[in-house]
Image: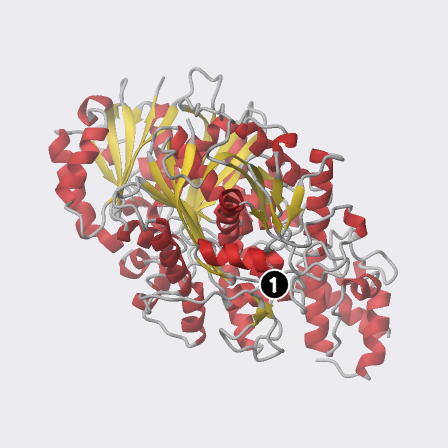
Amino acid sequence: MEKLINELQAKIVDLLNLPDVKPQDIEPDEQLVGGRLGIDSIDVLEMVIMIEKDYGVKIDSRELGVKVFASLKTMAEHIHPNVSGQTN
Amino acid sequence: MRIHIIGMGIVTALGSGRRSIREAFLENRSGIGPLSLFSTASHHPLPVGAATIQGGADNFPRTHRLALMAAEQAMANVSAAPDAVVMGVTTGGLSSSEKLLKDQVSDPDMYCRHATGSVAEEVSRIYKCRGPALTVSTACSSGAAALKLALEMLRSGRARRVLAGGADSLCRLTYHGFNALQLIDPDGARPLDANRRGMSVGEGAALLLLAANEPDGAQAEILGAGLSCDAYHPAAPHPEGAGALRAMRAALDDAGLRPSDIDYVNLHGTGTKDNDVAEARALSVLFGSAMPLLSSVKGASGHSLAAAGAIEAVMSAICISEGVIPANTGCRTPDPALELTPVMAPVRKQVDTVLSNSFGFGGNNASLVLGSPDGQLTPQKQAGTGSLRVIGHACITGAGRTRATMDAVANGKTCQGVLDTGEIAAKLSQAAVRRLKRFPRLALALARDVCESAADDPTPEAVFMGTGWGALSETSDFLERLFETDEQFPSPTDFVGSVHNAAAGQIAMQFDARGANLTMTGGDYSFEQALLSAELMAGDCRDGLLVVGADEHHEKLSPLFDDSVAKTKAGPADGGGALYLNKRGHARAPYIRSLLFESCRKDMDVRSVCRSAIDTLPAIDERYGIVLAGLPAACRTMAERQLKALLEMSGYKGAVVDYRKHTGEFASASAVAVAMAVNLLINGQIPASFCIGAPKALGSKGVLVVGLGNCITAIEVMNP
């Protein structure tokens, strides 16, 4: 799980081009959307596509999205049982 | 003055022509069905509103064909040419060019109708219009915004008859783009329904022949129109519908009406969760408990993007002329949270006034008020624009920002080139530009620089953007990833950024500019169109107006789309220019005025077009100390003939600068030229590099910026 969180930290910073944020700066429990990182609804959709593309996990409703993207930890928890360890 | 609709044409998924639409309304029919226009590799085809195209022009892109069908209906009983054409278009020839790009076709000729502006130009050519063919690209409000500009052209006396409307066709970019944003309802759009999940993308066209004071046989009147910008988010509406409310209030003010005068509201009503909430909240503030009858037609027709505002204007006119109110098709259980009761079945009823809403990406909002031509309401509004004062100017070229560009030019050096993207964004907040590629960065940097140069003025209220080609990087990246991933993983960020008005929306957000926000896409004359639209809208503005022209060079797409880039022997170039304008105060500031905007097509006689231009312009030799002339490489031979004829006929002997030799070839080079013109006037001196011999004083004379080629345009910058 920690490995997945580290991986997601790097992917998010790169994907969303977050200025002055290092991957490890994103705390596993901190609020991901609408918080200090400036992540908004368009970023969420970009992450939805990344998760589907890289982990094969679909998030196709806003209600599910709100739960999944609450924090890095919730993201990892949602991805983890669906991927049995393999990522690309 | 009253603005009558004396001809109208409509093509939608519900049918073509007024009679089909009326029948569809009465039958409460839907035209939405599964996509069959192109195959979708990754999923079941989603419901769309596809139109049936008839008639010739088979080799034209779909948007053009839709527009020509609508134009034919609108002009059926009219032989005189309109004085101007104004159209809202966002997709242009994209349905054809995205396929060509996928197939890696590299012949620029194949992309000759890619430009959004080419739709209005084609309509203008067929109906022999000699005046401007303007194109508004403000996403889903384009068609309504085009009608607002047409209205102001008529009110200002610049035209007696204007053919105005909008057109857009289904294409992969919008279909997959809205799907990537999770804004498409897999069961088809159900606006205002408790279970709604989004829109259905549609297509179509509508054109209205608008005339000043021609009540005979008029189907309806346009009583007023209002524009606003949310200045809130690139794609999501303001949650309280604050921008929507401002647009509706502006339209009512413009029409001289109160909310209680409205009989029916034709909703924007896309069926997305957020849109319907925002619109409902705005309506509740505007109308309180006295809510008029209301419905959205988008559950029947689909959302035809740039065409929607014009299509729904024609539908509103049909409501008035036929006495029928369409049902809110698709909605079964109205969402109690919206506290709105839409019309659930068609109603036969006399309708005298309609408020029609169109809102779009970039927070661009437009509302129209239409009325019965027999109505007793007398529109009060008169056009009122004086000259606009130039409070600030800025530009970016290959040489750098404003000062570096002006220094290069004064020293006889070129400013052609492509400035590093990092350098362009150097003074911008990195958080604000993290999702933005080259074109919106150029636009934001220009807006920032021009506001800095007008430091003592309040923040701008309205934004007028001109761009020949818009966000090429975002468009290219979106399509590339779409094709690479077999249509599975297109980027939502690139889709939102690819719309032509995304940059102007960013400017509005940065500067909290909540007034009119227009993006004009007219090829090499886009900046001229933006300035003209600023002049037309100035009567609706109290504070500053930003006029920005910019284009990015894109290694792959620029030479395919822009014939001047393909033809030039000089290297790549891009950049743009910006002005900060105000109506009042600043008595010592220079003023600027659009003097001329005429079409000059291959089938016209160059000398007679030039003769008419000279007749319109003031005495060039007496009034101007220098002429900056734009001769696009794509039509250089014709432009040289035009320039020669204009100089001969006017007897002008002063300095003439062929400015594209300095700036390089890009569509909004004229924006740089206008910034140069302002700079020349402020310095009061023509540098030696612009005239033979020593620098020369301008004295009391002004600067004339002339655009040549497929149009002849003239802008003057004068000292007071």
Q: Nearer the viewer, residue B179 or B147?
A: B147
Whole-percent x, y for residue A43 in the image: 69, 59
Could you tell me which chain the residue with mark 1 belongs to?
Answer: B
Instruction: Indicate whether B494 appears above or below B258.
Output: below
Among all residues in the image, which is located at the extreme right?
A: A29
Q: Which of the 4 image quadrants contains residue B507?
A: top right
Q: Which of the 4 image quadrants contains residue B505?
A: top right
Instruction: Indicate whether B553 appears above or below B317.
Output: below
Q: Which residue is denoted by mark 1 in the rendering?
A: B200
Instruction: Indicate whether B572 appears above or below B428.
Output: below
Q: Residue sitting at 53 percent across and 60 percent down?
A: B474
Whole-percent x, y for residue B115 in the image: 39, 57
| Residue B303 visible in the displayed image | no
Q: Quadrant of the N terminus of chain B?
A: top left
Q: Residue sitting at 71 percent across and 38 percent down?
A: B291
Whole-percent x, y for residue B402 in the image: 44, 37
